[in-house]
Image: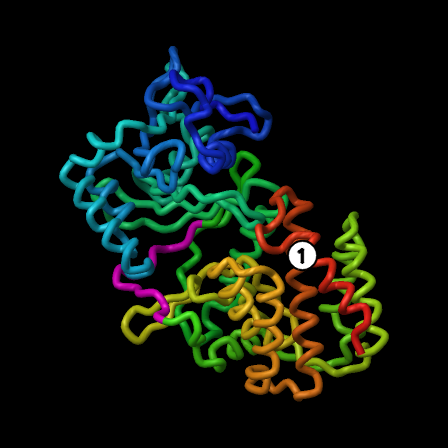
Amino acid sequence: MRTTLDDGPHPAVESSEALHTLVTQLWQPADGTPTIRATLDRAPAGHRVVERYAIVPDPARARFLVPLTTRASAAASVGRYNGLRPLRTRAARTLLGLGFRSGLAPLLMRRTLVISAPGDLPDASLADHLLTAHLSGILGGPLAAGISVREPDPNLKPILQLFRPDGQPAGFAKIGWNEATRRLVTREARATAAVRHAVPARLPELVHHGSWRGREVVVTAPLPPGVRRHPDPDRPLDPRIPLSIAESTGISTMPLAESGYWRRLAAEAGGMAGETPAAIVAAMRRIEAVHGRTRVRFGRWHGDWTPWNLGWDGQDLWIWDWEHSTAEVPVGFDLLHWRFQVAVAMRDLPLDDGVEAVRAAARAELGEAGVPAGDRGLLAALYLLEMFVRTCRLEQGGGGWHSRVFPEAMLPILREMETMG
């Protein structure tokens, strides 16, 4: 993968694939001709430094980029929203924040990511080439960004925690950088606007949605400083909350084969090449033959209903990350998604374990969504088809395969669906 990191004074082998990927997503222009350069430790000749980040813990194991704009913004970038993190991570982040506030941490972390611009590029033109400068113009003042460095996966989008020089939070920016992630970012903006006042929870305010240099950008307002994580992933929220999301933009009931949901899923699967999409189409034909006349309730879903996409501020529930939300899916999908994601994404269990978690949740929990007992196996199969289509769509949009949801894991499950009674 081509990045400008290898132009620095240290060899690119010292940097992780995750860091290279992030550099490509944020600082590499679509045409491949860089104006802004990202290098290790110092700027190339003829360039001036416009941003500098401490690489935590180091380039080979990079997990977080800490802005070195001011001590206050550096400390805030690692210490803010600690209540959303596990206890062990929280303690380490608190100590790291103290180190940056005192000025000691940058002395101990010897490697930095240097973002530079040509020496003759006017300051007035910087917003045309540097994302944080662009965002500073939108939000009305200087910004520093704390940026997580995550291992590549199909959903991967850079997320910037934005802070003022005094450490006050300014918002979150999510960046869609390829076809798949641009669609997700656009969907998040639309869903947030659609449901913001229609659910019994708080949503971060949508501050900005726009395009910049081939990227789709959404900025939301900061979360409250005291927000805390959901305490127990094995105890989901009261099902009335996701069911209120289902009702937020209207409920309809109709035969499965006549629904817009089924037509959309069939069109997506049929429009993709490869063995896995073909197996999805075959499974859908069988399900339609057996269950096409089954009446199903349809409504909106959050689309990524998980413990890490919500939190509590006192008695107020906050919900974020609406990028997968759509308005016509079978009611109850969010209940199944929680169990699937806890198994596969949180606990890194094999796909078969996630499938069993979905089927168990369908039997035990879909009664709360008004699904008759005889239709709950169908709902579980429909949910899995939805997730498999999503996975294939993200892969074909440039996101790659999920570490647990990939063709060799999906195909046996899809072939089992082809015999579904």
- Residue carrying label 1: 409
Does the magenta run of residues contain 292? no
| 97 relative to 326, above or below | above
Figure disc tally: 1
With 347 as the anchor, is 391 left or right in this view? right
Residue 316: x %, y % from top left: 33, 73
With 153 as the anchor, is 148 left or right in this view? left
**What is the magenta range?**
219-231
Dominant secondary structure of the residues highlighted in magenta in the image: loop
User: Residue at left 43%, top 35%?
Assistant: 131
Residue 52: x %, y % from top left: 32, 29
User: Residue at left 51%, top 32%?
Assistant: 24
| 38 relative to 318, above or below | above
- The C terminus, quarter of image: bottom right
Location of residue 414 (image quadrant) = bottom right
Residue 364: x %, y % from top left: 56, 83
**Foreground: 234 or 27?**
234
Does the magenta run of residues contain 222? yes
- The N terminus, quarter of image: top right
Amino acid found under the numbered disc labelled 1: Ala
**Foreground: 123 or 45?**
45
Residue 244: x %, y % from top left: 51, 78
**Foreground: 114 or 400?**
400
Q: Secondary structure at mark 1?
A: helix
